[in-house]
Image (tube, rainbow, N blue to C red):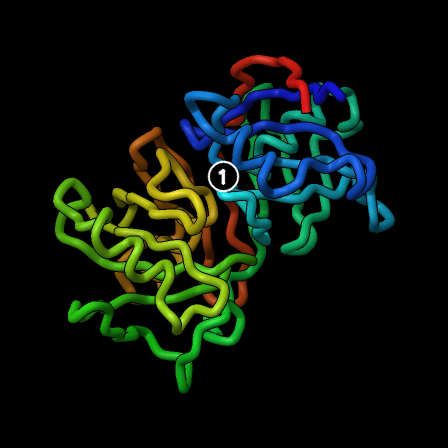
């Protein structure tokens, strides 16, 4: 069976996008891992699987699978790419595009070809939302991992995030602390780990170690999580430019209880098909 796909990326966070009408037509986890291999497969951080709508008023339901074959709840850069893919396929009748995902409803706004804003919902700081085994919600948490004391903030953006403030992202111990925190027993479903450098209230730098993937060039939900944690700490403004290794995202968040919006590119690299 041949699988047609579109290779896309949002600031270098790359995806394959394809349709699967049912679970029977979806490649299994082992095959997804093979396809994700950058030497012998297609290569991608996540696979975005488009299915028919499951909720009235939405254009499509999409699922997200990491490079390790595991399914996750949400992906910000992926949401933008799904919206752009739907536009290119002629399924977006208006600039406002309601979509559905395992993480819930996602409202996208098509600004111009290749530029998309996405409503990423209301950041949830309740530890049980991640889930995270903390006794109560706090501004800062502390964990020990292999003798290392780690301080961080935590928030759910439909998927779990831990955010560490660092003096410099260039010098941040991403390769060392990322895996330790990602797989810490306190996070039963693992966690995405962000390393946040505050340049000024309207500008931050960020690196993200994604669960099931490793460090990526960009992470949309990670950028939203970093701004939410930084703003809750009183260090950031309502509109923040987030510089990631792959480029810049614009994040707007009014504060607790408000929806957070992310704006950035969604780009097609190429189209192809692969034999399953």
Q: Quadrant of the C terminus?
A: top right
Comparing 270 with 260, the one in front is 270
Classify residue 208 as left or right of residue 32: left
Question: At 28% across and 60% down in the image, what residue appears?
Answer: 180
Residue most toward the right? Answer: 56
Q: Residues within 10 Å of mark 1 (few under 14, many from 20)?
A: many
Closer-to-camera residue (91/13): 13
Report the number of numbered marks.
Answer: 1
Residue at (82% x, 36% y) in the render: 21
Residue 47 in the image, given as x and y percentages of width and height: 58, 35
On screen, residue 133 versus residue 234, left or right, reads: right
- Residue depicted at x 42% and y 43%: 213
> How far across and how far down the image is residue 1, in percent?
76, 21
In the rendered image of this protein, does residue 233 appear above or below residue 27?
below
For the view shown, which residue lies furthest in the bottom direction?
135
Quadrant for residue 27, please give it. Answer: top right
Q: Secondary structure at mark 1?
A: loop
Query: Relative to 11, is 23 above or below?
Result: below
Which quarter of the figure has residue 206? top left
The residue at the point 23 percent across, 48 percent down is: 174
Kindly identify which residue carries mark 1.
Answer: 67
Q: Position of residue 46 (x, y in %)?
A: 53, 37
| Viewer-closest of 41 and 235 | 41
């Amino acid at each position: 069976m041949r699988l047609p796909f579109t290779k896309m990326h949002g600031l270098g966070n790359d995806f394959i996008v394809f349709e699967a009408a049912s679970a029977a037509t979806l490649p299994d986890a082992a095959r997804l891992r093979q396809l994700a291999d950058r030497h012998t497969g297609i290569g991608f951080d996540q696979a975005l699987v488009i299915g028919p709508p499951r909720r009235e008023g939405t254009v499509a339901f999409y699922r997200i699978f990491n490079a390790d074959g595991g399914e996750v709840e949400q992906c910000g850069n992926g949401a933008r790419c799904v919206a752009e893919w739907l536009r290119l396929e002629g399924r977006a009748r208006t600039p406002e595009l309601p979509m559905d995902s395992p993480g819930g409803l996602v409202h996208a706004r098509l600004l111009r070809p290749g530029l998309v804003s996405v409503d990423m919902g209301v950041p949830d700081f309740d530890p049980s939302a991640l889930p995270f085994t903390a006794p109560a919600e706090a501004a800062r948490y502390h964990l020990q991992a292999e003798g290392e004391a780690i301080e961080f903030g935590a928030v759910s953006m439909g998927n779990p995030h831990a955010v560490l403030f660092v003096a410099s992202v260039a010098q941040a111990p991403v390769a060392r602390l990322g895996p330790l925190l990602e797989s810490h027993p306190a996070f039963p479903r693992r966690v995405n780990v962000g390393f946040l450098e505050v340049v000024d209230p309207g500008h931050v730098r960020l690196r993200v170690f994604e669960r099931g993937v490793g460090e990526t060039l960009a992470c949309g939900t990670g950028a939203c999580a970093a701004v939410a944690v930084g703003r809750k700490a009183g260090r950031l403004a309502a509109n923040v430019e987030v510089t990631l290794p792959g480029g810049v995202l614009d994040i707007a968040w009014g504060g607790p209880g408000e929806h957070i919006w992310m704006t950035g590119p969604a780009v097609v690299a190429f189209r192809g098909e692969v034999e399953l």
